[in-house]
Image (cartoon, rainbow, N blue to C red):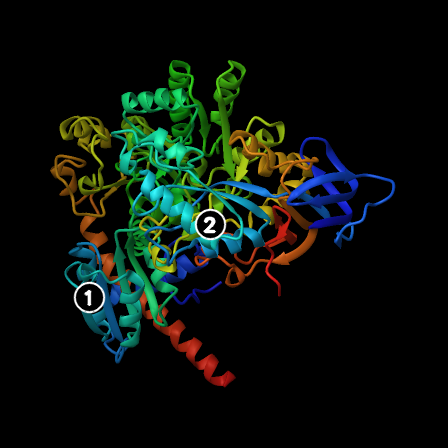
Amino acid sequence: MSILFTNARLIDPECGETRGALLVEDGRIKAVIESGDLPQAEKVIDCRGKCLAPGIVDLGVKVSEPGERHKESFASAGRAAAAGGVTTIVTRPDTLPSIDTPETLEFVVRRAREDSPVRVLPMAALTKGREGREMTEIGFLRDAGAVAFTDCDRVVTDTKVFSRALAYARSLDALVMAHVQEPGLSKGAVVTSGKFASLRGLPGVSPMAERMALDRDIALLEMTGARYHADQITTARALPALERAKNNGLDITAGVSVHHLTLNELDVADYRSFSKLKPPLRAEEDRMAVGEALASGLIDILCSMHTPQDEESKRLPFEEAASGAVGLETLLPASMRLVHGGVIDLPGLFRALSLNPSRRLGLETGRLTAGAPADLVWFDPDAPFVLDRATLRSKSRNTPFDGARLEGKVLGTWVAGRSVTETC
Amino acid sequence: MTFRARHLLGIEPLHPTEITELLDTAQHYAELNRQGCAPRDVLAGLTQINMFFENSTRTQASFEIAGKRLGADVMNMAMQASSVKKGETLIDTALTLNAMRPDLLVVRHPNSGAVDLLAQKVNCSVLNAGDGRHEHPTQALLDGLTIRRAKGRLHRLSIAICGDIAHSRVARSNIMLLGKMENRIRLIAPPTLMPSGVAEFGVEVFDDMEEGLRDVDVVMMLRLQKERMDGGFIPSEREYFHRYGLDAAKLAHAKPDAIVMHPGPMNRGVEIDGTIADDINRSVIQEQVEMGVAVRMAAMDLLARNARAARTETGVMA
C-alpha cells in the first residue's frame, strides 16, 4: 500500500518547514518530494496547503486501566489520541494497582494491542506499589516492554532508595522519569503560594519546592550517572539548575505540560477544580520563562499529562477535588497558542511534541525523513473553534479549556501509514 | 449602587456603597434591638437553615437569634453528625436541602470555596458564615459597624490586624472591607503566620508589634487558631504572648483612644491579656457580639428583599 500526500506544508522537526509531497510505502516514509515530478501511488491525499507533521509522542498519559476503566480505557484514550494527532501514547503506571510487575505490564500491553488505534508504550513503576521503599524488577519490566520507570506524581523521598534505583537503572540503561516537588514543602498545597492563593484562602506551595527537588535529583545523577527525565519543569527558578546540569554533561532531559505553558494560577478563578493540576498552575512570569525555555530547547519535551478524572472526583470543594486534566485532544490546538503567540515556530513545536520524546525513548518515530515510520498528523494550524468539552472522546472530560477559543484542528492522523481518524 | 445580590458569599465582590447600605440597615436594627422592638414580620413565613459543617457556637447562635427576631422559621443542622459521615457529597447535600425549598441557607464549611460551590447549586439565598481560610463576610461587616459606631466613621482610620493572619478568614474579609472603605491597614504577625504574597495586598506589614501598633485607631486581634495549625508555626504559646500578645505596654503605642477588638473566642494569655479584654474603656468585644446579630438581621433582610424583587420581576416577565 502506498499513499502520496501532496500540496502539504511539511513540518520537519530536524530540517524546518518546506512545501511539497510525501510518499508513504508499507507503513514507512519512502520519500520527501520538494519539487519535480510526483511519483505514482495507490492513494493520493491532497493536503490543501495545510500542515503535515510527524505524529505526536505524548509522554506521561494516564489510561485508567486497570482499576478505573470508567474514567478512561485504552479504547477511549486511543480514540482521543487519534483525534488529537497523537500517534504514540506513553502510559503512566499510576493505575490501580500500579504497574509494578511484569504480569501487570503484560496486561497493559495486551489490552493496548486489542483496543488502541494508536501505538501504546507503557512505563512501569520505579518502586513497588509506588511506595518509595523497594525498587521494582526493572530488568524484567524492561524486557516486558517498559520504556521508562517512574513513580509518577509521588516523589521517592528516601534518597538511599532513590539513589540505588537510579544506579540499578543505569546498569540497564533504563530511563527514569521523576516528579520534581520537594514533598515536605508541598505537603497539603493545592495551588502556588502568592497573592492569589492567599486571597482564595487555599494552601499554597512555594515555587522553590520544584527547584529544591530538582537540585536533589541532579546531585543523585552526579552520583549515579543515570538516564533521567524530569516530568514537568514549570518554574523559572528551576531553569538555571537544569541548564547547569545539562552543561555538565549529565544525561538529563525535562518536560512540561501544555497546561503550564498556556494557563496560569489565575485560571483557578473561583475555585475551578478543572484547573487543579499537579504541580499547580504557576504565576505568569513562570509561564513565560518556561515557554522561552521550551523554545530554546532547554526544556525538551511538551506533553499533555493527560489525567482523566470523572465528575465525582472534580465536583468537590477545591482542596478535596482530584488533580489533573485530560489533554490528548487539546494538546495540539493548545500548543498552537505558543506558535500563534510567537513563542516557538512549528518545527520547534514538533521537536518538543514528536522528535525529542522519540529520541529520548530511542524510537524511530518523530521524524519526517525517508525510512521513518509513517506516523503522521495532518492539521490546519489556523482553523478557529470554541472547545465544547462534551465533544471530547475521552471518557472523562475534565479539561480547563472548556469554552476556550483555540486555533488548530487535526484533519487526519496516520499510524504506520494507516489512517486512525474516525470517519464521520 | 445598591445591594442587589442574591447571595452574600464574601466581601470581595461588594462595592463600598453596598457595604454602606448593609451597615446602615444593620445600624437601624441595632437600635431596634436595644429598644427591644425588632419587627417580627420581616422574615415571617421564610425558612432559614443553618448548615454548619464546622463547629461553631457563637456564629450559629447569632444567625439563629437574628432569624428568629425577624420572624423566620430557623432550623439548625449539625452537618458533622449527619449525612456527611455517610459519604454524601457536598453537592448532593445541597440538592437535598434545596428540594425542601428553604429561603435562606447559612453555611459554614472547613474548605475555602465550598460555600461558593454550594451556592451554584441551589435556588435560595446563601450566606457564607465562614469558608476555610477564605471569607467570613458577616464578621467583617460587624467589625466595620462596631468601628463606625466607636469612631464615628469608617474611613481614613489606621487599623492594625494582629495574629494568625495566614489561617484567618476573618482577616481576609476585614482586609477587603477596610481597604474598600479607604482605611490604612497594618498587618502584624510573625512571618510564619503571614499569608504569602501579602506585600501585594496594599497593606503595611510588620513583624514587630510595637512598631505596627504605633498611632493606630483600632487594634483588631485574631484568635491563634490552634486547630488549624499543621504544627510548628510558633515556638511556644508563652513566646507568642511575649512578642504578639496584646498587653498594656504594647497597647500604649497605639493612639490613647484606640479601641481593641477580637472576633472571639479569646485565648486569654495567648493573644490578649485578660485585663485589656475586660477594660470597658478600650475593649469593644462585647459590642462586636451585639452588632453581629444586627448585621446578620440586616443581611438576611436585604437578601430576602432581593429574592422577592427577583421573583416579582420574573413574574412580570411571565
Q: Is residue B181 visible in this depiction of the protein?
A: no
Left/right of residue B68 with respect to residue B312 in the rendered view: left
Spot occupied by residue B53 in the image (x, y as percentages of width and height): 22, 57
Residue B129 vs residue A287, the one in the foreground: A287
Location of mark 1 (residue):
B64
Q: Chain of mark 2?
A: A
Q: Looking at numbered disc 1 in the image, what kind of residue is underneath it? A: Glu
Residue at x 26%, y 36% (from the top left corner): B163
Few, some or many residues within 10 Å of mark 2 (<14, 14–19, 20+): some
Residue closest to the eye, B105 or A404: A404
Q: Secondary structure at mark 2?
A: helix
- The x, y position of residue A168, in whole percent, is 35, 22
A272 left or right of B300?
Answer: right
Q: Which mark is residue B120?
A: none
Residue found 48% across the figure and 32% down from its top: A233
Identity of the residue furthest to the right in this view: A36
Image coordinates for residue A269, horizontal then vertical, percent: 46, 50
Q: Nearer the viewer, mark 1 or mark 2?
A: 2
- Amino acid bearing label 2: Arg
- In this view of the protein, which residue sits in the foreground, B38 or B267? B267
* Residue of label 2: A113
Within the image, what quadrant is residue B109 found in?
bottom left
Disc 1 versus disc 2: distance between alpha carbons?
63 Å
Chain under disc 1: B
Q: How many marks?
A: 2
Residue sitting at x 36%, y 47%:
A107
Q: Secondary structure at mark 1?
A: helix
- Residue B285: % across, % down: 20, 48
Specify whether B103 is left or right of A63.
Answer: left
Q: Which quarter of the image is occupied by the C terminus of chain A?
A: bottom right
Q: Quadrant of residue A344?
A: top right
Label 1 close to label 2 by CB (< 8 Å): no
